[in-house]
């Protein structure tokens, strides 16, 4: 686990082998065995303040956030973001893990997950806590097997807070 801060630039990151996040935690195991300590997970903490960021998670890692079985804590304050995963959240937790995502600014052009993860929030079987106070979300989707666009992965719950204005001004 570790902390990553992106302040600007153009970044394209892809995890190609294993189950790490595109940007965030590496592959973890605690989610598979409830007797393993949380610190053995592939937890990831990522803050994006600006830039053009594209991230693809391999295996069950999030695009941005936790690796497989790793919790993802992601804050987006600015920039343009595209993220996708297979099993983990596009932005948030890895497979079998929770995601805590705060969006205060920037543009999420695309955040998607197939195989049960949420577009933004929890990975497959993970809970999602999502707070949105600003920014623009153009597309967020759990593509198949029950993941939410914004919220929990398949079999996960969601706690969502939105404090802003819709495009129609309400």
Image (cartoon, rainbow, N blue to C red):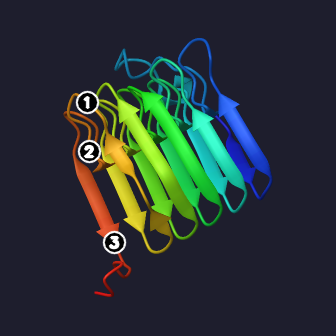
Q: Answer with left or right where residue 127 lies relative to residue 109.
A: left
In this rendering, is residue 38 above or below 33? below
Q: Determine the secondary structure under disc 3.
A: strand
Query: What's the distance in space between the residues labelled 3 and 1, CA to CA?
Result: 24 Å
The residue tagged with tag 2: helix, strand or loop?
loop
Of badges 3 and 1, nearer the viewer stands 1
Count of residue discs: 3
Whole-percent x and y of residue 28?
52, 20
Which residue is label 1 attached to?
144
Q: Earlier in the sequence, mark 3 or mark 2?
A: 2
**Residue on which the image places disc 3:** 162
Label 3, label 2: how many angstroms apart (C-alpha)?
16 Å
Which is nearer the eye, 84 or 130?
A: 84
Dot 3 or dot 1, earlier in sequence: 1
Give the answer, above or below, for where 121 lies relative to 19.
Answer: below
Mark 3–mark 1 contact, CB under 8 Å? no
Q: Is residue 41 above or below residue 140?
A: above
What is the residue that sits farthest to the bottom in this orientation?
169
Residue at 40%, 64% in the rendered image:
131
Q: Secondary structure at mark 1?
A: loop
User: According to the image, label 2 marks what residue?
Assistant: 148
Query: Dot 3: within a 10 Å radius of its alpha carbon, few (fewer than 14), some, or many (20 or more) residues?
Result: few
At which x and y percent is residue 90?
A: 45, 39
Residue 163 rendering spot, x and y as whole percentages: 36, 78
- Quadrant that contains the C terminus: bottom left
Q: Residues within 10 Å of mark 1 (few under 14, many from 20)?
A: some
Dot 3 and dot 2 residues touching (CB under 8 Å): no
State the residue in front, 22 or 81. Answer: 81
Q: In the rendered view, would you say 15 is above or below 80?
A: above
Q: Which mark is residue 51?
A: none
- Residue sitting at x 26%, y 44%: 148
Residue 55 point in image, percent of width and height: 60, 37
């Amino acid at each position: 686990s570790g902390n990553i801060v992106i302040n600007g630039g153009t970044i394209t990151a892809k995890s190609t082998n294993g189950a790490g996040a595109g940007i965030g935690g590496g592959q973890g195991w605690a989610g598979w065995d409830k007797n393993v300590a949380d610190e053995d997970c592939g937890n990831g903490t990522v803050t994006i303040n600006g830039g053009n960021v594209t991230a693809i998670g391999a295996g069950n890692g999030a695009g941005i956030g936790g690796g497989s079985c790793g919790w993802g804590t992601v804050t987006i304050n600015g920039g343009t973001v595209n993220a996708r995963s297979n099993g983990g959240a596009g932005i948030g937790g890895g497979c079998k893990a929770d995601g805590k995502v705060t969006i205060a600014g920037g543009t999420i052009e695309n955040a998607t997950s197939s195989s049960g993860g949420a577009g933004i929030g929890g990975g497959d079987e993970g809970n999602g806590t999502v707070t949105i106070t600003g920014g623009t979300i153009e597309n967020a989707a759990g593509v198949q097997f029950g993941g939410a666009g914004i919220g929990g992965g398949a079999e996960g719950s969601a706690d969502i807070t939105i404090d802003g204005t819709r495009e129609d001004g309400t």
